[in-house]
Amino acid sequence: MIRIARMKPEHVVGFRLQPKQAMLAGNLADPAYVAALVASGNAFAALVDGRAVAFGGCLEWWQDRAYAWMLIGEDAGPHFFTIVRAVAGYLQAAPWRRIEAAVASDFRQGHRLIKMLGFEFEGRMRAFSPDGVDHDLYARVK
């Protein structure tokens, strides 16, 4: 059974990112980075038997604008649709007028997911990620 809970630093212990997001593993190994996500108050973990299979949330840029993020574990597959339903509910209730997200330009499944969540393509961001990969900017506007 999956449970959605506020993210805690201990949730990242043993978490393994899906291959397409592996370049972000260093961020999760940085206690200051994890503490900043937790401190945002808008970071959540999808837990199975107390072990995280995904993280996500929004970072508020300013009033009515936020950046959505999601880190998916390599073992999240069996729980994916439950996670997507939880994310959709969170986004529906979110207080921000504009929520942005970035997806690696070559990540077909990521594009499918972000569109399912009601985001629309806005443009290409060159060399966006730590490994220099291009990403596409999406936004969901109420």
Image: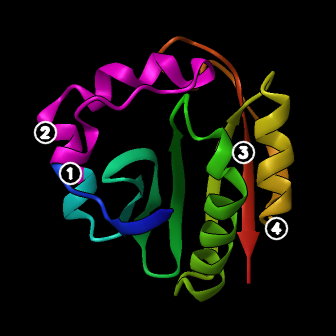
Cα separation between marks 3 and 4: 13 Å
Q: Earlier in the sequence, mark 3 or mark 2?
A: 2
Compared across the picture, whether 107 is left or right of 51 comes to right
Q: Which residue is mark 4?
A: 118
Q: Position of residue 93 (x, y in %)?
A: 58, 88
Label 2 neighbour load within 10 Å: few <14, some 14-19, many 20+: few
Q: Earlier in the sequence, mark 3 or mark 1?
A: 1
Residue beneath the point at 30% across and 53% down: 50
Front one among 121 and 12: 12
Label 3 neighbour load within 10 Å: few <14, some 14-19, many 20+: some
Q: Does the magenta run of residues contain 124?
A: no
In the displayed structure, would residue 39 be above or below residue 63? Answer: above
Query: What amino acid type is highlighted by mark number 1?
Result: Ala
Cα separation between marks 2 and 4: 31 Å
Q: Earlier in the sequence, mark 4 or mark 1?
A: 1
Residue 111 appears in which quarter of the rendering? top right
Label 4 neighbour load within 10 Å: few <14, some 14-19, many 20+: some
Residue 21 appears in which quarter of the rendering? top right
Report the label total: 4
The numbered dot on residue 137 is: 3
User: How would you classify the magenta stretch by its main secondary structure?
Assistant: helix
Cα separation between marks 3 and 2: 26 Å
Front one among 84 and 23: 84
Range shown magenta: 10-36
Residue beneath the point at 51% across and 11% down: 131
Q: Which residue is mark 2?
A: 32
Q: Mark 1 falls on what kind of element?
A: helix
Residue beneath the point at 49% across and 18% down: 22
Closer mark to the observer between disc 3 and disc 2: 2
Query: What amino acid type is highlighted by mark number 4?
Result: Gly
Query: What amino acid type is highlighted by mark number 2?
Result: Ala
